[in-house]
Image (spheres, rainbow, N blue to C red):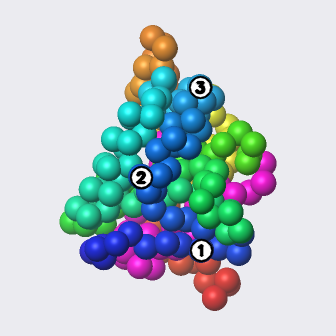
Amino acid sequence: MLVDAQIVLRTSRLLLRPFREDDTDRLGLLAADRRIADTMVSFRHPYSSDRARDDIGRFRRDWEEGKGAHFAIALANTPLEFRGYFALKGIDGEHSVAEISFWIDEQATGKGYVREAGREILRFAFENLRLNRICAYHMVRNPASAKVLAGLGLRQEGVLREKVRKCGVFEDVVVSAILAREWNEDNSMDK
């Protein structure tokens, strides 16, 4: 399904590229922000450089095994200094499904980067990988993620009560999804 070297995706403003070993320190710094871990379903705090190094290795293995595509979100004019993360995780070829996950550095919020990256990731997922369904999870108390997902065309399917525990507190999680046919209908005018 996937090629040997992870591809690079481009938008008018962004470069979505694979993580490299020399991204370890920056990933460790950005992902250590408690704000990011606080509302991520599958993210722990604290986050260290050792964890960043391990994750970058896992990102590479996920791509090689066809299980995922993890991208550093960078501005096109400063490709080495990434601002966030966007991924297709848990790619299941048999059922043609995957999950998206994302975060952005606080200094880059409110500029539309996540939505722009998300549109390109969904295009890649549906047009190149030929996936049928993309889902996403976000914590109920995270309206910013809900807004991004709705802007990408994902529809809320339900609430998973007390799905995660953050700092000892069980929290509800929203599941949303978009199907290939919905993506094609919504984006047929763009072509």
**For the residue carrying disc 2, how many other residues have a C-alpha within 10 Å: few (<14), some (14-19), or many (20+)?**
few
Residue carrying label 2? 21
Q: Name which of mark 2 and mark 3 comes first in the sequence.
A: 2
**Residue 69 - label:** none
| Residue that numbered label 3 is attached to | 34
Residue at numbered disc 1: 10
Q: Nearer the viewer, mark 1 or mark 2?
A: 2
**For the residue labelled by badge 1, is the local secondary structure a helix, a strand or a loop?**
strand
Q: How many marks?
A: 3
- Closer to us: 108 or 117: 108
Q: CA distance from mark 2 to mark 3?
A: 23 Å
Part of the protein shown in magenta = 110-137
Name the amino acid type tagged 2: Glu
**Residue 66 in view:** yes
Q: Nearer the viewer, residue 18 or 185?
A: 18
Looking at the image, tell me whether mark 1 or mark 2 is earlier in sequence order. 1
Where, quadrant-wise, is the N terminus in this rendering? bottom left
Residue 59: x and y in percent read: 35, 53
